Image (cartoon, grey):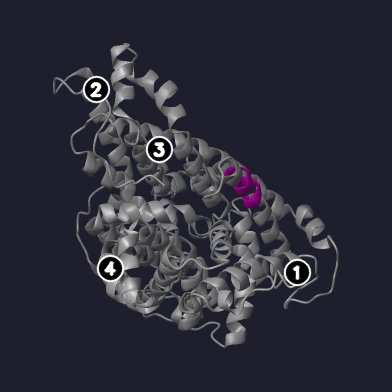
Amino acid sequence: MATGATKPFGLFRNMTAKIAAIPMILTALVVFAGGTIWTVVHSFTGSKLLPKLNWVGLDQYERLWNSNRWIVSIENLLIFGVFSLIFSLVIGFTLAALLDQKIRFENTFRTIILYPFAMSFIVTGLVWQWLLNPEFGIQSIVRDLGWTGFDFDPLYNQDIVIYGVLIAALWQGTGLIMVLMLAGMRGIDQDIWKASRVDGIPAWKTYLFIIIPMMRPVFITTLVIIASGIVKVFDLVVAQTSGGPGIASEVPAKYVYDSMFLRQNLGQGFAASTMMLLAVVIIIIPWAYLEFGGKKRD
Amino acid sequence: MTDVTHFEGAHGPKPRRVFSRRNIFLYGTLIMVALYYVLPLYVMIVTSLKGMPEIRMGNIFAPPVDITFEPWVKAWSQACTGLNCDGLSRGFWNSVQITVPSVIVSILIASVNGYALANWRFKGADVFFTILIFGAFIPYQIMLYPMVILLREMGIYGTLWGLVMVHSIFGMPILTLLFRNYFTSLPEELFKAARVDGAGFWGIYFQIMLPMSLPIFVVAMILQVTGIWNDFLFGVVYTKPDIYPMTVQLNNIVNSVQGVKEYNVNMAATILTGLVPLVIYFVSGRLFVRGIAAGAVKG
């Protein structure tokens, strides 16, 4: 009967370590687990200015998915997400492969391509807002060169504004992907290269059919990094377009912020952030499964 | 994760002649790419050194004819956000005041966590650690409001210390991981020997672990200083206008709707805000790469 009882000895063992770990335990339980559950629970309430427990079932979600603004946000996130995944991986890998050619000044090139990553999204957004300014920026330069019909004003055109944000995001983030890919390439056994050279396989084919499959773990990690960054995109849009023109470049994270802190509609914010969590869970679970599920835990 | 600081051992075939077609293609492409990446920084600098008439007439890529530092002075000490017209300097000092304690507190807590997890494994530690790591992937948006309530209950909502606490909490997953992995990699005999000698938890931490882990502390510092300096979301949610960090103030200056747009002042302000992380990046080199590779996990 009493077999399962914990001996006081067990509880007080490593007492100092346990006390020292209290901030971590509180953060994990109260903020991360507790906060997440709290928000999910409150997404089923009609909270407006203050959080209240007046249940409304799935009303908030219904309203959310009927909101034009949310639909636009989701569409933008999908377009932005798909393109930034493809372009980050392709550009990142290509740049890494170029730097992998025993070139001189490799450090210089790497430093230059990575520096935008040190800058905040606010700075990135504002610079590209200026570069894409139709009156003074790239559009006017090309027109001055003689091509007067040239149109490139993504930040003032509802249909393509999200691509303007994409350009800025790629400029800021591809350096990191390149560095991760390069590290992955350097981790591959030199003998593979020797063997493929002996067999007379051209370098590009070796990269495509031998190196890429071997870099699978690096690709998966990179994919997760890019994907979880995409879901969170917020500051860049705020700085570059403020969600405009109109609502054409809204994103889910901004919807959450605006609902909670500008429009006093907490319930909507909770529902929208729960949807964001769901999106991340859908990305993370298969990855966690691939990464840790197959192997036995140590 | 693979160590990304090792860039030795390029794989491609050995270059032969200097002006082979391969080399021209390779270096040509790389130089074009490098130009593309440098261009925005160049445009920022050039724009910030021009007067407004010159900007209105000319080309954003053209070097300034009349170099003027007035936009910089104006951005630093006169630019307006709402009713305040004391420039970005206010935001700069706020950011300094926010970053310094946040970096120190978050690193202290995380290094002790990492040490406890690596050397003093206790029952349940893995569970908390797993939740913590999952926390790194959860979108911050979902924890924004519960955190507001928590800070309000503690009476520090809207204050500098509230924001310091937020940064310490949300920086914890990645930093704890960083320190745990580092301490795990140290030889266990050291720890055991110290235990035999009767050293306790704090004794081992201060006398053995700390002196041996300077590099990882530097990496953590680089990661945190850039991360916290560049933060926008927490700054705008958890502080009040008079202690807004630099990023928030910059955004308010540039994207304010009133008044005539002064692009040169805006660009000077933008460079000023980007300067701190940029200097850290160029000075720290490989350590920065190590930091972001670890920090990249948080997205």
- Quick check: A244 left or right of B199? right
Amino acid type of the residue that numbered disc 1 sits on in the rendered structure: His
| Amino acid type, callout 2 | Pro
Name the disc covering residue A42, or none: 1
Q: Are marks 2 and 1 on the same chain?
A: no
Q: Quadrant of the N terminus of chain A?
A: bottom right
**Residue B96: mark in rendering:** none
Residue at the farthest top position: A200
Counting labels gives: 4
Label 2 residue SS: loop
Q: Nearer the viewer, mark 2 or mark 4?
A: 2
Question: In terms of secondary structure, what is the magenta stretch mainly?
Answer: helix
Q: Which residue is mark 3?
A: A92
Disc nearer the start of the sequence (3/1): 1
Which segment is the magenta one? A280-287
Say whether marks 3 and 4 touch (CB < 8 Å).
no
Mark 3 residue crowding within 10 angstroms, few (<14) / some (14–19) / many (20+): many
* Residue beneath the point at 26% across and 27% down: B26
Of B296 and A213, nearer the camera is A213
For the point 58% across and 55% down, the residue is A244
Of marks 2 and 1, the one in the foreground: 2
Between marks 3 and 4 in the image, the one whose residue lies nearer the viewer: 3
Q: Residue B272, can we see it?
A: no
- Marks 3, 2 in one chain: no
In which quadrant of the rendered view does residue B294 lie?
Answer: bottom left
Which residue does the image show at 29% across and 47% down from the upper left? B5
